[in-house]
Image (spheres, rainbow, N blue to C red):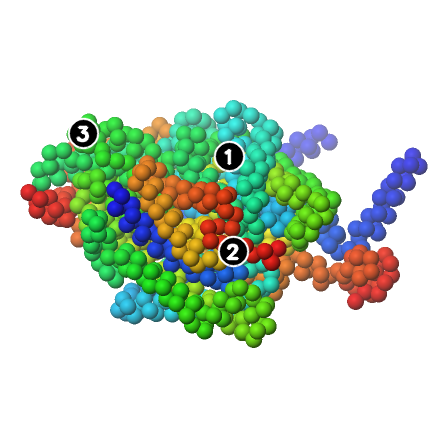
Amino acid sequence: MGIIWFHIRKAFTLFRSEVLVLPSRVAVLVFVVALLVLPVFTQDPYLLRVLIFTSVFAIFAASWDLLSGFTGQMNFGHALFFGVAAYTSGLINVHFKVPYFLSIPVGAFAGVLTGLIVGIPCLRLRGTYLALTTLAFPIILMGLVFSFPDVTGGELGVMGLETLARSRIHVYYASVISMLVLTSIMWKITDSNTGILFHAIREDELAVRAGGINTTRYKLLAFCLSGFFAGIAGGLYAHIMRTVGPSTLEVSLSFQVIIWSIFGGIASIYGPVAGVFILFPLAEVLRAFPKYRMLIFAILVLLTLIFMPQGLIPWIRDKIEKECPRCKVRSIATRKTCRICAASLD
Amino acid sequence: MKRSSVFGVVLLFLTLVLCSGFHAWAADPIKIAIVGPMQFTQGEGHWNGATMAAEEINKAGGISVKGTKRTIELIKVDSNEFLSIPDATNAMELAISKHKADFVMGGFRTEAVLVMQDIAMDNKKIFLGCGAAHPELCERVTKDYDRYKYWFRITPINSKHLVAVDFILLDMVAKAITKELDIPKLKVAIVAEKAAWADPMVKIAEGKLPQMGMEVVGVWRPSPTATDTTAELSAIQRAGAHIIFTTFSSSVGIPLAKQAGELKIPAAVAGINVESQKDGFWKATGGKGDYGLTVNTYARVKITDKTIPFFDKYLERYKEAPNYNAGTYDGLYLLKTAVEKAETLEADKLVPVLEKTEVTETAGKLVFTKDHDVTWGPGFVTAIGTQWQDGKNLCVWPNGWQGVKYEGTVEYKVPPVMVEHYKKKK
Amino acid sequence: MIQEIIINGLINGSIYALLAIGFSLIFGVARLVNIAHTALYMTAAYFILIGLDYWGMSAPLAALLAIVITTMLGLICYQLVIKPIREHEGAVLIATIALAMAIQEIFLIGFGGHYLGVPPAATGYLFLAGVKVAKQHLLALGVSVLALVGTWALLLKTRIGLGIRCTAQDREVANLMGINVNREIMMALGISVAMAAVAGVIVAPLRVIDPHMWMEPLIMMLAIVVLGGLGSIKGSFIASYILGFTEALVVFALPMGAFLKVTVALSIMILALLIRPEGLFGVVFEEER
């Protein structure tokens, strides 16, 4: 009994001293709790639907960040992973009646394989070459989709997939919880040694190689990991939509994910997630001005970029939090001294 | 204790009945959501056709349900389906759950309509399809009647029947050319956009054309959004085709017609070319698309008594001829008839009534088949063939087919470029 | 058959060359991946339409106006949007995407999603080696060769060109040597956008004008630029014709697969990159690690 009490108290202290002290952590907490309890207050099917797609695309955007934000391997054709996984899960679900809890992982695995296939030739390429080459892959695949309409259904896609769940609430929880879990995993990965190496590759690949590290292997790993998470997003999308069409491979989707991520702030995982959670519902809110919707959207993105080229979230974070010059721990901006080492801030 | 709870239940029940009954008595407008790509011609057609019908019906007092007259309130929902499928599904959800639409109408891109159909069916809302021709949409009704029975297709006719019309038109063109130019064996170039709906068309054409006494010189499958078809046209000309048999629903129909006109390819362009159904086609091709023939839905011919007044009114108001998505006009009138007969807006009661409804509207006599598709055939909706002749899109078919000829139909003209080319040769 | 492939390849290639060379130039000078490049090409196409249809201008005047307005617009957009964030590579990237989207939306709002067209400056066709070629296409061919020669002369024979080349080679050193780098970039951008505008003006009469017409050429243009080697103008020129011929070849050799022409072109690009990662004539920017 005492031990349990001790652990509860310890958890509480930890919570108070590590979570409540930083506004960004509080914001994340509020965000997670709000998402989880939302259906208690409203079960509006439209709202839930928007949030379901937002969650799926949040996974997708975070997976782009894992690859492009962290390792700096600009991927202009991220829809490839999404589309491959969506088609794979769709096809095996429809033709072989594989249930969704298997077809989504298989789709994700297909994403990993695609990551490998695309990653290997792309390893020789850098920067803009890489970006523009990756753009080509989903388009090539789209050509194949149209070439074999008997299998892929051509422009109609694969129809009649099994739903995740009959009720909207279940689908909502399935996608929101997958989003929370997967983005936490991605965030943990970037926080690990691997993630630090990813970051280092982006900053100075030559230096990392000089440090005796096989950067090729890490870049390939980034491609595979990113393919995996994007693949799960694709599989989820397929089962929520219940059809998979060539729109999952379109250039506009690849561009969209870049916009979401860079808008939110790359190399942070939470940035792209926030980017999707701001921009995707925003596009829905803008339905009030149907004609000017996308124009307002584009102009808002442009304005945000001009004033906060690092992305929205890092900008806000820098405004409300300060980093201690001595111990690199972040404190709330109102503090005069660091919360750990008491060094003077600013 | 027990008695009070029973009492409570009874009271609750009574309130519910009263409320629901009250709801039916109050003359709320009937909400109809028009879902379509509103920034594009297709969506404009949806909206314009529906607006005209709704205004006319409202002016006449509305739709009478159980003795009360109820007006129509249209809700414009932009599906943006050409650019984003999630957008389309969100729009559908919005129409049903936020705007509380009683009926939904519209849809164009099949990939999007399939998903939107599912949402409407989940909510048991009657969805009148106006725009997507794919058979699957109606086959679903047969496969799973209880789920998909709320779907009905108003326009266009099923693509299976489009094929039939297509070949009748081709036959007509072939006969006209043979008669005028005395070419023993006609050569046909099949040009179809690379899309699933066009695949069966190509297969059938390859099998059927030799039986019809024509030679297939090649099959070209450009991308639906190709912007340049010069290479294809060079190849077609080299093959010496007399007829370019088109199967297009997307933008590629314009550059092909335009460039064929620019290069004066001596061949008759005939088949399906959705872009050439629109008035804008003439301007888009700079008049180069003259003499192109396409399967169509509306032209200024007397398909029924209602067609010409509708056509003229539409033309006057929107400065262009209606395209087939404007079938929402017919859809609203059909709905009016059915609702007045069923005396209810309840989807489950309305479905059997809709199944039996027979009305004569602008596109012909609308009767639904077993799978909730619009019936095709003489006496029903036939679709028409229209040819551009000096800047006017005129009806050239049916011209006596199965005894059907609509007032205002003209004869098919062999393109003068072709006449010139082959007369000179002799 | 062979004449047809050659002539169609030349036509395709020359239009791509006009687009790709401009893109390559500004990339070389400012390291700017301008996704909005073809959106500006679309802008010119719309402006020639506006000039002809709404303002009732004569064709040459409308063409000139379209080119001038588009160029100005390109420069203004650069000053307003790109310049403040030039240091942030990612931000520039989506800024140009968002810019392209904004341009697309403006035309979508103004003209709807309708397919429009303008009459060609040169109507009719000629026989070239027994193949019918639209005069407008010949014009495109001529103009693209002219533009190329012009750009070449400008870059190699004039002081302006010298400045641009200096900046392209090493921006910092150029700056240290007293070259106004910003002016050189504006200059290069002006040339680049003007070339896109010329392409738009020439192609508009032969194709369809609609708010999404920038997507397809964008992809081909990027493929060409990568294949030819980023920043290499000669490479872009040659790659334009390689992919132009490829497209024509696909249509003739595989009529059933005409829709695959973009796919095949992109596959060739990837195969070529496997062998030469820096493109055919690319320069390896080793200092930019």
The reply to the same-chain question for discs 1 and 3 is no
- Give the Cα distance between marks 2 and 3: 60 Å
Q: Secondary structure at mark 1?
A: helix
User: Percent from the top left, x then y, of residue A185?
Assistant: 70, 41
Q: Residue furthest right?
A: A2
Mark 2–mark 3 CB contact (< 8 Å) = no
Give amino acid for label 2.
Val
Q: Amino acid at mark 1?
A: Tyr
Q: Position of residue B168 (x, y in %)?
A: 20, 34
Tag 2, which secondary structure? Answer: loop
Question: Label 2 marks which chain's residue?
Answer: C
Please tell me the numbered disc located at residue C119: none
For this view, does C2 lie left or right of residue A61? left
Discs 2 and 3 carry the same chain letter: no
Residue named by callout 1: A87
- Residue that mark 3 sits on: B212
Circle 3 packing at 10 Å, graded few (<14), some (14-19), many (20+), is some
Does the image show residue B227? no
- Packing grade of label 1 (10 A; few <14, some 14-19, many >=20) is many
- Residue C283 marker: 2
